[in-house]
Amino acid sequence: MPNILDIRRRIRSVKNTQQITRAMKMVAAARLRRAVERVLNARPYANQLRAMLASVAARTAERSHPLLATRP
């Protein structure tokens, strides 16, 4: 049977682990929030790029170019 010192040490260890886990969750949430923000900020650029490529592809419809080929 563990004595009182072992029990206290174990309680302290569990509390430290909980604190570390909480901090890791906060860091992960901040990283996720930043990644989502970057994706949202990149959408207008991607939409404009898609429109430009569609315009170029429409103008060169009679000729096929490997860079304009659609891929699955």
Image (cartoon, rainbow, N blue to C red):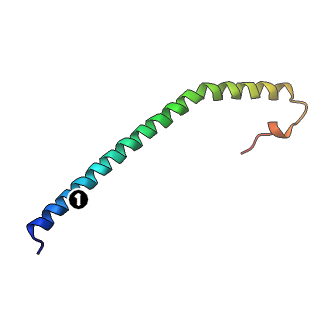
Q: In percent of the image, x 67 and y 24: which residue is there? A: 48
Q: In percent of the image, x 54 and y 33: which residue is there? A: 39
Residue 59, quarter of the rendered image: top right
Relative to 63, 27 lies left or right: left
Relative to 43, 7 lies left or right: left
Relative to 66, 3 lies left or right: left
Residue 14, quarter of the rendered image: bottom left
Q: Which residue occupies the extreme right position in the image?
A: 63
Q: In percent of the image, x 55 and y 27: which residue is there? A: 41
Relative to 67, 72 lies left or right: left
Q: Does 18 sit above or below residue 30?
A: below
Identify the residue under disc 1. 13
Q: In percent of the image, x 74 and y 25: which residue is there? A: 52
The foreground one among 9 and 45 is: 9
Q: Which residue occupies the extreme bottom position in the image?
A: 1
Residue 65, percent across and down? 86, 37
The foreground one among 65 and 7 is: 7
- Classify 10 Å Cα crowding around label 1: few (below 14), some (14-19), many (20 and above): few
Number of numbered labels in the structure image: 1
Q: Does 25 sit above or below residue 48?
A: below
Which amino acid lies under the numbered mark 1 shown in the image of this protein? Ser
Residue 64, percent across and down? 88, 36
Q: Secondary structure at mark 1?
A: helix
Task: Check the picture and name the quadrant holding the C terminus.
Answer: top right
Residue 32, percent across and down? 45, 39
Residue 28, percent across and down? 41, 44
Task: Check the picture and name the quadrant holding the N terminus.
Answer: bottom left
The foreground one among 45 and 72 is: 45
